[in-house]
Image: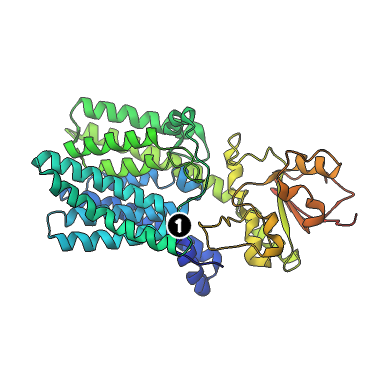
Amino acid sequence: MHWALYPNLGMDLLVPRLAQCVGVESATRLFLLCSQILIIGGALALERVVKGRVQIGGFVALLFVYCLPFSWGFLNFEFGLGVSLWGIAGYLMVMERTFLTRLVVNAFFVSALFTVHFFSLGIYGAAIGIYELWRANQRKAPYHITALRLVILAVPVALLLLVMRATAGSVGSEGTEWLFQYKPLWLFRIMNGYNLTVSAASVLALLVLLYLAFKRNVLTIEPVGIWLAAGFALLYVVIPSKLLGTSFADLRIIPAAVMIVAAFCSLALPNRKWLAAVLLVVSGVILANLATVFAVWLSYRADYAALIASFQKLDRGSRVLVGTSGDGDDPPFKDLTQYPMAYAPTLAVHYANAFVPNVFTEIGKQPIRPRADVQRLAIPYGGPVPMRLLSAIAAGGTTAAVPSFIQTWRRDFDYLYVLGPASANPLPDRLQEVDRSARFVLYKIDRRP
């Protein structure tokens, strides 16, 4: 472990401490539960501060509580977004207070968000910054006053960045891609991480409801809400899809923007027909997405139990490679219901003290480091290796374009997990079956020349 002020430490700080009392699995579930409570509670708190009452914030949070970035396991971001919602609410409460009060409240939430997840800090900063600009425009405030208020927001961040650099931490790594062709798709994919049809139908139903509600003046939005919506829309367009080595940066803006802007919208239902229609559409979308997510997750219970049991059959301290009978896409867009198993074998690090190259060990972003003797085999991030590629290497095929950490996989690794539907042994002369379930097979690798 190499600790520094990394801006992505939510689970690293909390889950190991909880695990000492309740175990790793229960600690992770508690972290997920806390993240969801923070999201829903933060949306309610922000709406209460803005409007003095709770109206639609809770429903909007429930609509997105299992959206794509959350169901794909971006738990630090989910936890951080919950904190950022509370932070925005807290800052708006003290916006007209003294300079010192605003500085203290802002510094507290900036420090928390910087530690938990840097992108959540960006959401907080963007929302508060846009609100401050709207406030200055409305009050025709002098430029120097507006600049001073914005500096108050930036000072804690600047100080933390200096500390981060001094402790050898970093925000990210190389690798920035815009991928503009995916931005329209994310708008319809965002509601559900496992089923495009359910997600697209949910978005279309909500868009129709929103159109009718705005057209009939049932739903209204405050001027600052328009500023926030426009600001986040612009940010979504210009931000890279892969930012400093972090993938799916743009799609994370969507749930954050919707939950923040919803706090500045007011609903005035004219009659019971409108009430029934709104409840029917919103409840239907919430239940459809919850049912889809829970159906996928529950279908993995037996396989997760079998996987955890299989770790007992690994030699302590062994090297474990993760392969797949599929294409190795990360995420597997052809069938996203396969995604919950993609990184499950990395639990062998905990249960068997094994080395698994898929564990995130990017220097400057995580405190975990591979040992010197396996450094060349570690990859900062990446999914399972296609079995067809491993078979080609075993057959003596070309390795010119093959990642270095798998070019000599038969000699470097002791075990191989092949994820996907169980099938016949692809290399019976090299692999000895140890265990299997419906979604994986565990092999012991014959390392003899």
Q: In which image quadrant can residue 329 be found?
A: top right
The foreground one among 80 and 309 is 80
Q: In which image quadrant can residue 371 be found?
A: bottom right
**Which residue lies under the disc numbered 1?**
8
**Quadrant the N terminus occupies:** bottom right
Which residue corresponds to the image point at 47% horizontal and 60% vertical from the top-left? Answer: 169
Q: How crowded is mark 1: few (under 14 residues within 10 Å), some or many (20 or more)?
A: many
State the image coordinates of residue 71 (x, y, percent, origin top left): 49, 47
Q: In which image quadrant can residue 318 be found?
A: bottom right
323 to 164, vertically: above or below:
above
Q: Is residue 207 left or right of residue 317?
A: left
Q: Is residue 63 left or right of residue 407?
A: left
The mark total stands at 1
**Quadrant the C terminus occupies:** bottom right
The foreground one among 438 and 244 is 244
Query: Which amino acid lies under the numbered mark 1 shown in the image of this protein?
Result: Asn
The foreground one among 181 and 301 is 181
State the image coordinates of residue 349 (x, y, percent, origin top left): 64, 63
Q: How is the image coloured?
A: rainbow
381 to 199, vertically: above or below:
below
> Disc 1 on helix, strand or loop?
loop
Residue located farthest toward the bottom when viewing the structure as drawn: 21
Residue 434 visible, this orientation: no
Which residue corresponds to the image point at 55% horizontal and 57% vertical from the top-left? Answer: 363
Which residue corresponds to the image point at 61% horizontal and 47% vertical from the top-left? Answer: 382
State the image coordinates of residue 201 (x, y, percent, origin top left): 43, 30
State the image coordinates of residue 266 (x, y, percent, origin top left): 19, 39
Residue 182 visible, this orientation: yes
